[in-house]
Structure formats: C-alpha cells, structure tokens
C-alpha cells in the first residue's frame, strides 16, 4: 500500500445522508489515500457536503452522468494515481482496515482489479441479507481466464459499490466503457482477464451495501442486466453462462430462510421468477420499442443517450 498512490472515487447524486455516512467511514481508515467526488448536480445538499469535507469535488450536469463514462472521466482527470477505489454513495466501509485490505493485493503486479466484500445493511430484509451472503463469501480468491471453465461468468464478477482498479490495467483495456447501460465493472474485469491480468476478490475488505428492492424494482434491475448481456454477448461466449447458479441461489435462499420463515418462501419464489422473466424479456430488447424499454428499466436516461 505504501508504494501505491490510491484514490477513492465516489459518484454522487441526491444522497446527502448516505454520503455523510460513507465519508465518516473513510475518515476512520488507516490507509493513506485521497477522496475524489463527482456530483451530478444534486439538489439536496450532497454537493455542499462533499465540498465541505473533500478537497477534490467536481460537479457535472445530471444529464451527462454515465455509469462507465463518468468513472473514466475521473480516471483521466487524475492520472497521478496507481489505484482507483470506486464506491457508490449508498455503501460505507465496515472497519478501519477496509481500504488497506482492498489495496494490498495489488502488491502482486499481475492483479488488475480487486473486488471487496459486501455485507448487508443492518436494516436489510432477509432476502437482501441472503443475496450478500451468497455473492460475497468471506474467502478470498484470485481468478484468471483459466478459471472460466470452472467458475463461468462469475470469473469476471465485480461490483462498482466497492472495487479497486490498477490504472495500468484499466488503461490497457481501454478504460471504462461509455456505451453500456450498467455493469461497467464486469465489462472491465472481463477485458482485463482476456488481456492476461488477474482479478482478485478480497474477503477481508468489507463494506456495507444492500438494497431492499420491491418486486418492481427487482424487475427493472434485472431488465437492465439482461440488456447489458444481450448487447455484450462476448462475455458469455468467453466465460460461459451462470452454469446452474440460479438454481443454487434459490436453494441457498430457501435454506437460509429455513423452516422458521416458511411464510417468506412464496415471496422468494415469486421474486426469483420475476428476476428471471425480466432477464429473459430483455434478451429480446432489440424487438421492443424504446419507449417501452425506458419504462421497464431502472436506468431510464440510458434510453435517451446515443448508445441506446
């Protein structure tokens, strides 16, 4: 960590309370780093809070925000860093060693990205809690392209809520893409793996982050995920599909709920069916009118962009 110059980059929009909690957790870190905030013209005091606590704050028009493009803009504006830790405003670091722990794997010069572990928020629903337990285990792992036959698409798993990138590797693969609706994190991780880099998952680097989505929000989220995969078929062609991961997830969720929460089982089945339907529907998005896709998806502004 001492030989690497690290920046923590946070895109924000109307999340003052969340940002305050995140900044408080950053203040407690033992690591040496700089904080960079890019705010999409918030109207709730988020920008003013960031300015009062961070020396590097950029304000952009909300219409100019792009999941990949805005992050890449920050990388290009600040070329002096070796590692960029990207976080979302609704996450916060679990302990004072979190940033140090997500940065230390970069001592291996073959590692291009490190994804941290996400723990559910303290007010998370049982289903939201299980999602974090299933997708973010405590065991660390280093993955390469050779792991694709065993791990499938999870080889390239990454999350923009708490993920770090080596500048050299990021720039080698062309940086974050502007044209994707979301999952710019998986896109970059996949490109790095294909270029010969390794991607790490660090179970000791922990943040709190989860969502208590409604059924409709789950549908919209998975519709957007499906759009991403439909438009980037090379990822599944290279790494394979989920390989039965969906069934394992459902069985794991039912086991987590257990006999004491049998009343939650119907909701579990319904929620997973909704996610599957949304994903399958969006695989055919090329045949759907843009106005309908805008209504069905979560990231509506994408459909007004030149990439839609």
Image (cartoon, grey):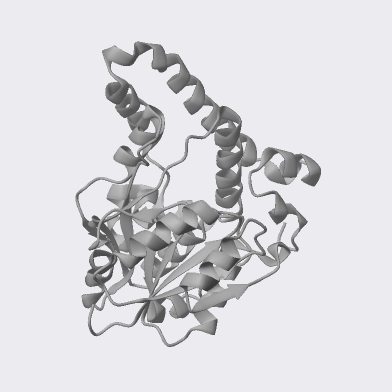
Measured from the top left, where is residue 251 in percent x and y?
32, 25
Measured from the top left, where is residue 37 in percent x and y?
51, 70
Residue 52 shown left or right of residue 286 in the figure: left
Seen at 52% across and 31% down, the residue is 276
Is residue 177 visible in this depiction of the protein? no
**Which quadrant would the N terminus be assigned to in this image?**
bottom left
The outermost residue toward the front is 52
- Which of 135/153 is in front? 135
Seen at 63% across and 56% down, the residue is 44
- Which of 173/200 is in front? 200
Seen at 33% across and 15% down, the residue is 261
Quarter of the figure with residue 160: bottom left
- Which of 34/107 is in front? 34
**Which quadrant would the C terminus be assigned to in this image?**
bottom right
Eyeballing the image, is 226 above or below 67?
above
Is residue 81 visible in this depiction of the protein? yes
Residue 219 shown left or right of residue 35 in the figure: right
- Which of 27/32 is in front? 27
Quarter of the figure with residue 192: bottom left
Residue 114 shown left or right of residue 215 in the figure: left
Seen at 55% across and 50% down, the residue is 229
Measured from the top left, where is residue 70 in percent x and y?
59, 69
Count of numbered tags: 0
Measured from the top left, where is residue 256 in percent x and y?
28, 25
The outermost residue toward the bottom is 80
């Amino acid at each position: 960590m001492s030989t690497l110059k690290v920046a923590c980059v946070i895109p924000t929009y109307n999340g003052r309370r969340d940002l305050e909690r995140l900044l408080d957790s950053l203040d407690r870190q033992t690591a040496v780093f700089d904080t960079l905030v890019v705010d999409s013209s918030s109207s709730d005091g988020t920008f003013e809070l960031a300015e009062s606590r961070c020396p590097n704050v950029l304000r952009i028009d909300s219409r100019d925000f792009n999941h990949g493009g805005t992050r890449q803009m920050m990388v290009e504006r600040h070329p002096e860093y070796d590692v960029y830790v990207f976080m979302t405003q609704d996450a916060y670091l679990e302990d004072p060693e979190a940033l140090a722990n997500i940065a230390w794997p970069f001592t291996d010069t073959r590692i291009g990205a490190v994804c941290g572990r996400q723990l559910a928020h303290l007010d998370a629903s049982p289903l939201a809690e299980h999602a974090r337990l299933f997708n973010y285990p405590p065991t660390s792992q280093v993955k390469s392209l050779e792991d694709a036959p065993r791990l499938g698409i999870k080889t390239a798993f990454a999350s923009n809520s708490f993920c770090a990138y080596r500048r050299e590797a990021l720039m080698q693969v062309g940086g974050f893409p502007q044209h994707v609706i979301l999952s710019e994190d998986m896109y970059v991780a996949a490109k790095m793996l294909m270029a010969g880099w390794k991607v790490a998952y660090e179970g000791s680097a922990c943040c709190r982050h989860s969502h208590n989505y409604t059924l409709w929000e789950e549908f919209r989220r998975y519709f957007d995920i499906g759009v991403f995969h439909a438009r980037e078929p090379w990822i599944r062609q290279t790494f394979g599909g989920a390989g039965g991961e969906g069934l394992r997830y459902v069985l794991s969720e039912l086991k987590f709920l257990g006999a004491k929460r049998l009343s939650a089982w119907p909701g579990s089945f319904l929620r997973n069916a909704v996610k599957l339907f949304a994903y399958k529907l969006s695989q055919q998005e090329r045949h759907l009118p843009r106005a309908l896709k805008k209504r069905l998806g979560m990231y509506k502004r994408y459909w007004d962009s030149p990439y839609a």
